[in-house]
Amino acid sequence: MSEVWKPSVTVAAIVERAGHFLLVEEETSDGVRFNQPAGHLDPNESLIQAVTRETMEETAHEFTPTALVGMYMSRYVSSRTTQQVTYLRFAFCGEVGKEHKRPLDVGILRAVWMTREEMLECESTHRSPLVMRCVEDYLAGQRAPLSVIYTHPSVIGEFRG
C-alpha cells in the first residue's frame, strides 16, 4: 500500500482597518518575512476557531471572521528538508477587536499595519505570493458566507467514531 498524501491546512486573517491591513513580521527559515496572521489547523479545531486563535496568538488582537475570502492551494519546496509541501489556505476577513497585552507567538517579531501600497513596496519580503493575492481578492470584494463551511460536531472535541 502506498503512503497517503496529506496537504497542510492553514488559515489566514485578512484584517483591514481604515485602509491598512494587519500583518505580522516573522522569522522564517528564509529570513524575516511579512504575512497575514496565519497558521496551521490544529486537531479538534474548526477553521473558524483556528483563524481566531492564530490572529490572537500572532497579533494579540481579537478577530471575528465574517466571510471566507478564498481557498488557495500552493506548493513550496522546504529549504530545510527539500521536500515539496502542499498548503491549502483558507483566508477569512472579519472584524478586528480589542488588542490584549500579551506576548506574541514564538517567531513573531511584531504586528504591523500597512496600506496596500506599502505591502506592494515590500512584496519581495512576503512569506508567499498568497499574501498579496488574498488582499487583492479581498479588495475586489470576493466573499463567500461562512455558511459554506460545515464542520461536523464530532470534529470538535473528542472523536467518537
Image (spheres, rainbow, N blue to C red):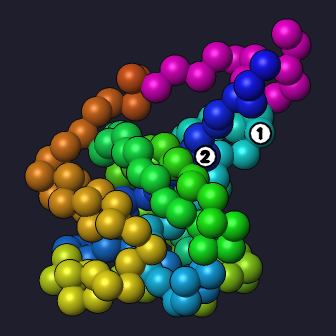
How many numbered marks have been drawn onto this rendered protein structure? 2
> In the displayed structure, does residue 126 sit left or right of residue 155?
left
Residue 157 in view (yes/no): yes
Q: Secondary structure at mark 1?
A: loop
Quadrant hosting residue 142 = top left
Does residue 5 sit above or below 38 in this rendering? above
Determine the residue positioned at 74% across, 25% down.
2
Q: Residue at x 70, y 17 (%)?
A: 153
- Callout 1, which amino acid? Pro
**Is 121 above or below relative to 9?**
below
From the image, give the main secondary structure of the stretch colored magenta.
loop
Q: Amino acid at mark 2?
A: Ser
Is 157 contained in the magenta span?
yes
Q: Secondary structure at mark 2?
A: strand
Residue picked out by circle 1: 43
Quarter the C terminus occupies = top right
Q: Position of residue 138 (x, y in %)?
A: 22, 54
Q: What is the number of the mark on residue 126?
A: none
Task: Measure the C-alpha gap from mark 2 to mark 1.
Answer: 12 Å
Q: Which residues are magenta?
A: 149-161
